[in-house]
Amino acid sequence: MSTATPLDGPWMFASACGAAAVNSSTGKLTAVACPSRLCPPAGLVPLDEYGRISPHEGLVPGICPFIGYRVVPDPGVNLRDPTRRRS
């Protein structure tokens, strides 16, 4: 019997992804640019309900190794702050 929870497992700060989308009403991360060099650079990958990178195809050979990583905001970053830098 597994005692794993949705918050277990590997995680990374959003800054490691280079770009992120935030829901303006909730302040939660919704999508990120995959940090893998083997994934297409265009577009953002959606996060699941637990903030983990959802399944997507990499360039070689197939699925990306970052699928399942939980992405969290960097320390001290307020995602609801309207003056934060936008790219």
Image: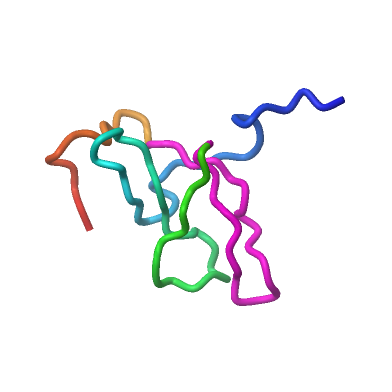
On the rendered structure, is 53 left or right of 17?
Answer: right
Residue at figure coordinates x 82%, y 27% from the top left: 2
Q: Is residue 61 magenta?
A: yes
| Range of residues picked out in magenta | 50-73
Give the image location of residue 58, x and y in percent: 60, 70
Task: Please identify the residue farthest to the right as the structure is shown.
Answer: 1
Please tell me whether residue 41 is drawn above or below residue 53 in the rendered image.
below
Query: Tell me, what colour scheme is on the image?
Result: rainbow
Give the image location of residue 9, x and y in percent: 66, 36
Please tell me whether residue 39 is drawn above or below residue 87 in the rendered image.
below
**Label total for image:** 0
Decide whether the magenta segment is chiefly helix, strand or loop: loop
On the rendered structure, is 22 left or right of 81?
Answer: right
Residue placed most toward the observer, 66 or 51: 51
Residue placed most toward the observer, 50 or 71: 50
Residue at figure coordinates x 41%, y 45% from the top left: 14
Q: Quadrant of the N terminus?
A: top right
Give the image location of residue 71, x and y in percent: 48, 42
Q: Quadrant of the C terminus?
A: bottom left
Residue placed most toward the observer, 72 or 48: 48
Q: Quadrant of residue 24?
A: top left
On the rendered structure, is 71 left or right of 73?
Answer: right
Q: Is residue 27 magenta?
A: no
Residue at figure coordinates x 37%, y 36% from the top left: 74
Give the image location of residue 81, x and y in percent: 18, 34
